[in-house]
Structure formats: structure tokens, C-alpha cells
Amino acid sequence: MPERKNLPRINTMITSCDESHVEGKGKNHLDSNGPVGKFKGMKCSVSTGNNNICRPVAPVTSPESACARISLPGVMDAEGRVDESRLRMHIFKNGGVSPDERGQVWRFLFGMYPCSSTALERHLLLEQMAVRYQVMKRKWQQLLPGAVYLRLNGTDAELLTAVKFFDQRQNREQNQQQYQSEEAREKMSFLHLQAQVLFERVTFDLEELQEAIRIIDKDVPRTDRDLPYYRNEGLGNLLVLRDILITYAAFHPEVSYAQGMNDLCSRFLEVLDSEVDTYWSFSCYMEKFSKDFCADGLYRKMELEAALLKELDPQLHSHLVTDNMEKLTFCHRWLLLGFQREFEHSDALRLFEILSCDHLELISQQVDRARYQERLSCKHSLEEEPVKELHAVNTDFTFELFMCATILLENKDTLLSCRNEVQLIQFTSSLQGKLDLNSTLKKAEEQFYNYCKRSSWDYLSGLCHTRKSKEDHFLYQLRNLFS
């Protein structure tokens, strides 16, 4: 691993992940294409917009995003600060946001912009992020000039067209820079110098980076080519996606690139429609979920899914979790990509933001805090007998696991008839684009709350046998939570 100096953070956006450097030959990444592969009364009737409109190549940056308003009630104050709790609550209770709001909401939801920032502060932040991204991108391009352009074999005429549209965008960006004022040029020059100093000592393992670029160049041309965003002039967005992924791999060597990242990054690019904004939002997302692209992280998630399924349906669990079934690894792609292909595209985007708002996980954290307060009160109580700690809900059971379990339970009869891994793969392929999101969300929510209530009351029953006190602070907290 090359020496890598600690870099200053731009609002937690330039970071390294703790996982081992994996992917490519001999690495521990998983292939997303392989077999390892409160909602009650929820308002889900949102506009899907005109998905047939083809857009031009995404600009490098989107200055208007710094001052754009979010019209969701009570979410943004007069100076542009966002109430993060209300934003996440709105997403969850309303089943996502409208396409018109989505781009701006995602910039806060995924951490590109701090929710505490004002519109004036975001303008300066965006300038800084844009310059730093350009310096980062130029650094790997100077070291690997042969990798600046996607290598074409001449058999894909659309890719040849994509290169043309991408080059036209580059020319437009350069022409716009010529009309900057002298003051703006001096400011940009200072930011460039600052960024160059910041990244001066960053070194690359060129062999590892070239391997990552090889895989990216294989994956990018087949990414979401059926979407309107990548049609006509939008074909150039494939080249934008490529540059983002290579820049990420170059400056995050412990993560590098793994198959599936192209699908996730494409989702950000389509919604944000800006190269710089997509890079930083995707980087923030990967800070939390990069471990899912490593074998250990994904197998851990499979173990949790198996444990949850055992709680919900022991019969289906015993059938699926066998030596032949390899512990539910056929659900790999569902969880890795956030069910991107199992629902219609606009619904998949809604689901992604619902899962990312972490609302139910925040409720689980409230339960955990209540249990912590209970343990403190036990520690300082006058009781002489030690109290055996009991476990209530498993806070590792995130809502996406309940979504996965719900899909399995809804197809229980079909799954019970599957006798080997091939049949399971055929089953998962048959679901692509055919699931109903609103119905699945409602059933997953019911599974979640039923599990929490059952587990929590089991916990309280245990307390009744171990505690003498009739007053129970945790019981009070829990009743408030589930009332």
C-alpha cells in the first residue's frame, strides 16, 4: 500500500475508509452481478416527472444548487439551514420526495452540504469542492495520460458518439472560464494552489489504479444505457461517470473500485446532474457503505438477514439456509444496490432515499438510549442482586433487511419449491422490475413493528422476573415509543 498522508476533511467529505484495499484480481470484493449477488397511511402518490426527456451532458458543477430552496414544510429556514430530523421524517412518512425536489434534497441527505450551512456558506463550499475535485482528477490524468480517454474498440457506435458529446461539454466549460472576471480568476487561482498543496503528497499505486480503470472501462459502457438520461447527447454522461469512478478509486485506494459502484454512482449522477456534486455525494455515501463491497461486510449482512428470517419464519429460514443455498447469498444484489432492479426505476429512486433517511434506525437508537438509561439506574440502585442484562430488539436489523425479508415471505411458496442455487437465481431474475413498492413498504413496516413489539414485550416479561420494582423507566420509554 503506498504511503498516504492524512488529508484535511471538507465537512467529512475527503476521508478514507477502514476496510482493506479490495477488488480486481486476488482481492476480496464481491461481484454484484453474481449469485452472491412510519408508513401507515403513507402518502406515496408523488409525481414521476417526464422520464422521456433526454438531457445533455451533465455540467461540471451546479452553482444554483448552493442557493436553491427546499419547499418541504418546516425543513429549511430563511437563511437556508436544513432541519435534518424533519427532512428525514418527511422522506420516510411521505414515501420519498418529488422528482423536482430530489436533487436538492439528496445534496443534504447524503452529506454533500452540511445541514447547518447557510446558502452563502454553501456557495463558498461548492467553489472549494469544485476546485479540489478538478485538482484530484487532473492528478491521476497527468500520471496516467493513456487513461484519460476510454479505449474504444470501434464496435460500439454509440460510445463513439458519447466521446463527441463529452468533448463538446469540455469545450463549453473551457469557454465559460474565459469570461470570468479578474477577481474570480484570482480567487480560483488561490483555491487551486490550496488544493495542490493539500494533495501534493498523495501517491498512487499505479498498478492497482490501472487495474481499477480496466474494470471501470468494462462496466461503465453497460451502465443504465436504457435510461433516458444516457440517450442521445446524454450518452456523454457515461464518460462523466467514468471520470468520477476513477477519481474515487484513485483517492480511496483502500476501497478502490468494485462492480456495483457504477450502478450506485449512476443513480447519483442522474439525480444531481453535476459531476462535482455527484463525486462528493457518492463519496459521502461510500464512507458509510464501502464495507458492503467487501466480502466480510456483505457476509455479515447475509448473516443478519438469515437471523431476521429465522425470527420471522423459521420454516423458510431452515429451507434457505443450507449448504446448497449458501446462507441467502442470492439476496446479495438486492441489498448491495438497494433493490435497484427489483422495482420500476422511479420507484427504485424513491426507495433509495427512504432507506437512506435511516428513520427507523434512528428509532432503534432511541430504544438503545432508553436501555442505557435503564442500565445506569440499575447500576446505582440499592438492589443487592445483580440484574442479568436482557436483550430487546436487535438494532442491527435495519429496515432494508425487513424489505428483503418481506420479499422472501411474499414469495414463500416459490422459494420452498427451489432446490438449488440455480433455481434461486432464476427466481431473483424473475422479480426484476415487477415488484410493487407501496405494497412492499407497507408489509415491511408491519414486519418491523411486529418484530419490535414482540421482542420488546418479551424483554419486559423477562424484567418482570428479575426486577422487584414496579416502576420501570424503560417500560415508560417503550410505551411512549410504540403508542
Image (tube, helix red, strand yellow):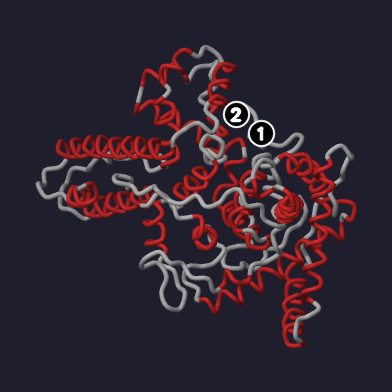
Please name the residue shown 77% across and 61% down the image.
Answer: 137
Q: Nearer the viewer, residue 285 or 22?
A: 285
Please name the residue shown 15% across and 38% down the image.
Answer: 464
Tell me: 157 left or right of 274.
right
- In terms of image quadrants, where is residue 221? top right
Q: Amino acid at mark 2?
A: Val
- In terms of image quadrants, where is residue 156? top right
Asked if disc 2 and disc 1 are in contact, CB closer than 8 Å, the reply is yes
- For residue 31, the mark is 1
Q: Nearer the viewer, residue 45 or 333?
A: 45
Please name the residue shown 68% across and 39% down the image.
Answer: 259
Q: Is residue 258 visible?
A: yes
Tell me: 291 left or right of 257.
left
Give the total of numbered labels: 2
- For residue 423, the mark is none
Please name the residue shown 66% across and 37% down the image.
Answer: 29
Residue 8 percent across, percent down from the top left: 64, 68
- For residue 36, the mark is 2
- Sequence-wise first label, 2 or 1: 1
Q: Is residue 473 above or below residue 117?
A: above
Residue 32 percent across, percent down from the top left: 63, 34
Residue 45 percent across, percent down from the top left: 39, 48
Residue 286 percent across, percent down from the top left: 59, 51
Real-space Cα separation, disc 2 to disc 1, in angstroms = 7 Å
Q: Is residue 300 visible?
A: no
Q: Amino acid at mark 1?
A: Asp
| Residue count near mark 1 (Cα–Cα under 10 Å), binned few <14, some 14–19, many ≥20 | many
| Residue count near mark 2 (Cα–Cα under 10 Å), binned few <14, some 14–19, many ≥20 | many
